[in-house]
Amino acid sequence: DQQVKQNSPSLSVQEGRISILNCDYTNSMFDYFLWYKKYPAEGPTFLISISSIKDKNEDGRFTVFLNKSAKHLSLHIVPSQPGDSAVYFCAAWALNSGNTPLVFGKGTRLSVIA
Amino acid sequence: GAVVSQHPSRVICKSGTSVKIECRSLDFQATTMFWYRQFPKQSLMLMATSNEGSKATYEQGVEKDKFLINHASLTLSTLTVTSAHPEDSSFYICSASVSGYSGPQHFGDGTRLSIL
């Protein structure tokens, strides 16, 4: 049973437009969420995170929205750039529940077309 | 800062060979290191957590005698895939944390293991 789901395996967006990547989770103990970006042949790189006490966190072109009642979060990239083309992983953490590991989604491959 | 180096990046070897993968934190001391495995089009799956100076904690379904983990120092953890078989072929990634589970994880670039 997958606790973190990224239902879109891929997404194509025109350069300059908004990219929206979605993530759903099932475990109500998750209280911290992270987005990682991964280029081919490289490890994931931390992008942005959000605590469950917030519903929005913004960092430059990247904004993460959290809807706790729907157990849904999304990553918005505005404006999208060709260099944003990568696989994006959503990860969830039960941070306040003791020693628990990150749980990752399967990832969404974003292609930004020039 | 917070660089994690993983070596080798790619291994191709014969079935039955044992393969060692190293994970080093270059500019910080990692009390906890994590080993993940990723199959194509799948998520990163945690295999085990290693804390410096103690035995690794393996996730359910991961054979500890197959995947030997050693975290001998605050900057080095190794994963040895013993007597590797073709089904062990996968992408293995390590990550390191300064403050255990509560700290952010910094990832290595991964090791592509191919067993012929």
Image: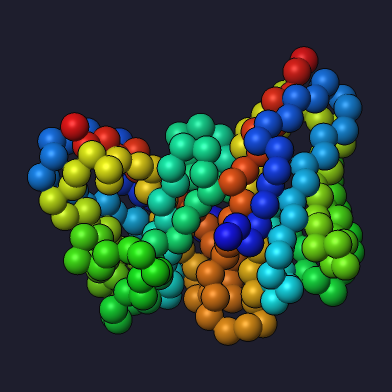
Residue B9 seen anywhere in this rendered image of the structure: no
- Rendered position, A113 above or below B34: above
Q: Nearer the viewer, residue A74 or B86?
A: B86
Number of marks in picture: 0
Q: Residue A102's x, y, as percent?
A: 57, 65
In the rendered view, does B39 fall on the left or right side of B111?
right
Q: Residue A58's x, y, as percent?
A: 86, 54
Instruction: Name the residue at the left extreme.
Output: B16
Report the colour scheme. Answer: rainbow
**Which quadrant would residue A84 be assigned to in this image?**
top right
In the rendered view, does B110 fall on the left or right side of A7?
left
Measuring 43% from the left and 42% from the top, which residue is drawn there?
B39
Measuring 28% from the left and 54% from the top, which residue is drawn there?
B22
Residue B79 seen anywhere in this rendered image of the structure: yes
Instruction: Name the residue at the front extreme.
Output: A1
In the rendered view, does A74 fall on the left or right side of B64?
right
Quarter of the image that includes the N terminus of chain A: bottom right
**Which quadrant would residue A62 be assigned to in this image?**
top right
**Which quadrant would residue A108 be assigned to in this image?**
top right
In the rendered view, does B91 fall on the left or right side of B85?
right
Quarter of the image that includes the C terminus of chain A: top right
Measuring 35% from the left and 42% from the top, which residue is drawn there?
B90
Q: Nearer the viewer, residue A49 or B15?
A: B15
Q: Residue B64's x, y, as percent?
A: 25, 68
Q: Nearer the viewer, residue A68 or B72?
A: A68
Q: Nearer the viewer, residue A111 or B99?
A: A111
Q: Residue A22's x, y, as percent?
A: 77, 46
Measuring 52% from the left and 38% from the top, which residue is drawn there?
B41
